[in-house]
């Protein structure tokens, strides 16, 4: 969601902040702004629309401005316009703030501040933060406040802490004060915030992508923590002023990995990165000699996982679809009763969490607000909570008891692709190992491990069909309603295929178990309605052929994802895409590829911005 950047160093701040904002464009935004500080004056420029529009109104960079904050906003409170764009200042012009999150009690605070003759100009909850800090800062400077700042603490930092104590909700913040031209403050509760530590410079950001051009060393703030940065260094503490020691971490990816390279879009790049991403994901974890899976992050929890009688997977969006496949895997291979829950609903419906319940939270970013909240709720209820995330040091990674990193590399495209297949690979590896310990023989585990090891090469073969799939997209993009249908392990893939098409091409699509179609949705079929069937060889092959016939008889246009060498399927298909043969439980890592490519080409052919689809953000960090 919103991108936050702050800079303090030896260089002109403006060019660094603008470049960092561009690194965060993939998160989704509707306006952008920047504030720089020099000679005791905070200068704010902001504009609705793209960063390029903001650049048009900026003054020439000044070497005197070595401190600043910047922001890309995705509207929550208030319309997406110039007035509501960040940064926001307090009514005195002394304080400037950029904010990611939602302040739940902003209306109450605004009423109280208004009663103190504090003026507001925007509709945002963020302006409440700026004015609240400004109010306490004015009070302590005027001597009116009976509780003075401690002798060892400056008034700016103290005023920030006073304000944070009043806020209910979530925030990632970067804050300036006109009277402190060499100080930058950041604070976190529920929204990501990272401090990059360079040579004589510091970059505060909501995402490591804004940092890696300058340094690969960073600290990750935890909830209810703040950092105060000066040219002499930084110190971290809780918002209650208790010192906290933070460890420097190495950011896992390089600048080169987040560049687009020779691809037209990040999404296409990431689709084509999947063979290598899966090799990295599985690297060092597959012991083919002993037919075992080694998941170091879960080593001390595997016995507990093996004994659990109740496994819950929580996730949102694409990760939820991966979780559905995981549910089938755990029940089939390990015979563990498993349920998949939308994280956004989990904590609101009083779920049953018994003794020995294990909850696995799955998120690419590790910052998904609903999934993080579900993990915290499950921990409070006594469950063992594990995480499967891609971003090292993310909030879910630090909240859960243990977990597994995807190691899929940075994913910039809003529509998740390589993270999905990496999630499937991790869930498959875990299910094989639990199955080996509980239910299947070492021989069967070895066979599955061999098949899993072959998946990256098979994906490479599917990618060669991109131009063929583009032709299929071209023939059908004028249709505004599509169906995606699958059975068994490929039912969640049908859901994912429909989601991808909706996300980036804005074509309405519905994913269904193929057998459910005749229980109502078949009424949607009219002449030429595209129906994408995953009809690979497997236990339910004959059944899905019957489903295809039902749609075909009603005039649907049949697009089939089938197994290589299946000659009989050709008579059913108007368009055919093939995948290499694989066991049914491993097929989702293959069958999803044609659907990702189909959605990509459909969006491009319809002239849509594939990497920045409307109304969407890469990481949903507010509920």
Image (cartoon, rainbow, N blue to C red):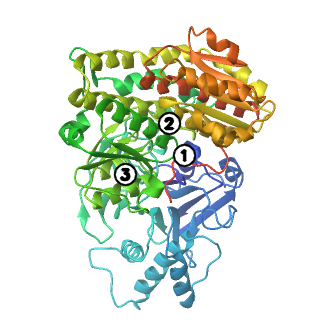
User: Regarding mark 1 in the picture, which secondary structure is present there?
Assistant: loop
Q: Which residue is the site of mark 1? A: 618
SS at badge 3: helix
In the rendered image, residue 434, in percent from the top left (x then y), is placed at 26, 32
Mark 2 crowd level (few <14, some 14–19, many ≥20, 10 Å Cα): many
| Mark 3 nearby-residue class (10 Å; few <14, some 14–19, many ≥20) | many
Instruction: Quadrant for residue 446, please give it.
Output: top left
The answer to whether the residue labelled 1 contacts the one labelled 3, judged by CB atoms less than 8 Å apart, is no
Left or right: residue 485 versus residue 481 is left
First reached walking from the N terminus: tag 1 or tag 2: 2
The earlier-in-sequence mark between 2 and 3 is 3
Alpha carbon of mark 2 to alpha carbon of mark 3: how far? Answer: 17 Å
Q: Is residue 491 left or right of residue 229?
A: right
* Mark identifier at residue 452: none
Residue at image position (69%, 30%) is 531
- Residue at 50% x, 62% y: name it: 101
Q: On the image, numbered disc 3 is attached to which residue?
A: 395
């Amino acid at each position: 969601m919103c991108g936050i950047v702050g800079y303090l160093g030896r260089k002109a701040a403006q060019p660094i902040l603008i470049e960092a904002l561009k690194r965060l464009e993939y998160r989704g935004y509707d306006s952008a702004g920047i504030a720089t500080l020099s000679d005791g004056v905070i200068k704010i420029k902001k504009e609705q629309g793209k960063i390029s529009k903001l650049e048009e109104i900026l003054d020439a960079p000044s070497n005197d401005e070595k401190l600043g904050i910047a922001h890309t906003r995705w509207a929550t409170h208030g319309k997406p316009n110039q007035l509501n764009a960040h940064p926001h200042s307090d009514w005195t012009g002394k304080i400037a703030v950029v904010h990611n999150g939602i302040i739940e009690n902003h209306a109450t605070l605004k009423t109280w501040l208004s009663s103190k003759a504090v003026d507001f100009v925007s509709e945002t909850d963020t302006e409440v933060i700026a004015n609240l800090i400004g109010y306490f800062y004015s009070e302590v400077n005027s001597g009116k406040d009976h509780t003075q700042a401690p002798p060892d603490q400056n008034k700016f930092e103290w005023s920030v802490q006073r304000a944070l104590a009043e806020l209910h909700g979530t925030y990632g913040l970067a804050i300036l004060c006109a009277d402190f031209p060499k100080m930058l403050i950041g604070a976190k509760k529920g929204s990501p915030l990272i401090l990059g530590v360079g040579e004589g410079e510091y970059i505060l950001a909501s995402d490591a992508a804004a940092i890696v051009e300058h340094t690969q060393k960073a600290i990750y703030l935890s909830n209810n923590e703040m950092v105060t940065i000066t040219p002499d260094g930084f110190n971290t503490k809780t918002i209650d002023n208790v010192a906290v020691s933070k460890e420097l971490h190495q950011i896992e990816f390089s600048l080169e990995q987040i560049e687009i390279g020779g691809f037209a879009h990040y999404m296409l790049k990431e689709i084509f990165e999947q063979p290598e991403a899966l090799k990295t994901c599985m690297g060092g974890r597959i012991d083919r000699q002993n037919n075992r899976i080694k998941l170091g992050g879960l080593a001390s929890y595997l016995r507990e996982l093996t004994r659990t009688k109740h496994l819950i997977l929580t996730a949102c969006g694409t990760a939820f679809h991966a979780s559905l496949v995981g549910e089938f895997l755990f029940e089939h291979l390990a015979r563990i009763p498993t349920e998949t829950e939308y994280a956004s609903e989990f904590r609101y419906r009083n779920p049953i969490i018994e003794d020995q319940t294990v909850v696995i939270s799955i998120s690419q970013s590790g910052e998904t607000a609903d999934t993080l909240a579900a993990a915290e709720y499950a921990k409070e209820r006594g469950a063992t909570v594990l995480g499967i995330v891609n971003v090292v040091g993310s909030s879910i990674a630090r909240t859960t008891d243990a977990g597994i990193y995807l190691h899929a590399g940075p994913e910039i495209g809003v529509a998740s692709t390589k993270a999905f297949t990496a999630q499937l690979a991790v869930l498959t590896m875990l299910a094989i190992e639990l199955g080996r310990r509980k239910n299947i023989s070492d021989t069967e585990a070895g066979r599955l491990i061999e098949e899993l090891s072959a998946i990256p090469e098979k994906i490479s073969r599917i990618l060669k069909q991109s131009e063929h799939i583009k032709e299929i997209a071209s023939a059908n993009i004028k249709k505004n309603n599509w169906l995606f249908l699958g059975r068994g392990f490929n039912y969640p893939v049908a859901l994912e295929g429909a989601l991808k098409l909706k996300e980036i091409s804005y074509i309405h699509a519905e994913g269904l178990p193929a057998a459910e179609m005749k229980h109502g949705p078949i009424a949607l079929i009219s002449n030429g309605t595209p129906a994408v069937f995953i009809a690979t060889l497997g236990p339910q092959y004959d059944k899905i052929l019957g489903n295809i016939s039902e749609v075909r008889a009603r005039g649907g246009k049949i697009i089939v994802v089938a197994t290589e060498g299946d000659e009989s399927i050709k008579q059913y298909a108007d368009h055919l895409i093939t995948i290499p043969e694989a066991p049914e439980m491993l097929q989702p890592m293959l069958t999803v590829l044609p659907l990702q490519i189909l959605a990509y080409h459909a969006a491009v052919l319809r002239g849509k911005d594939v990497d920045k689809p409307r109304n969407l953000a890469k990481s949903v960090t507010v509920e």
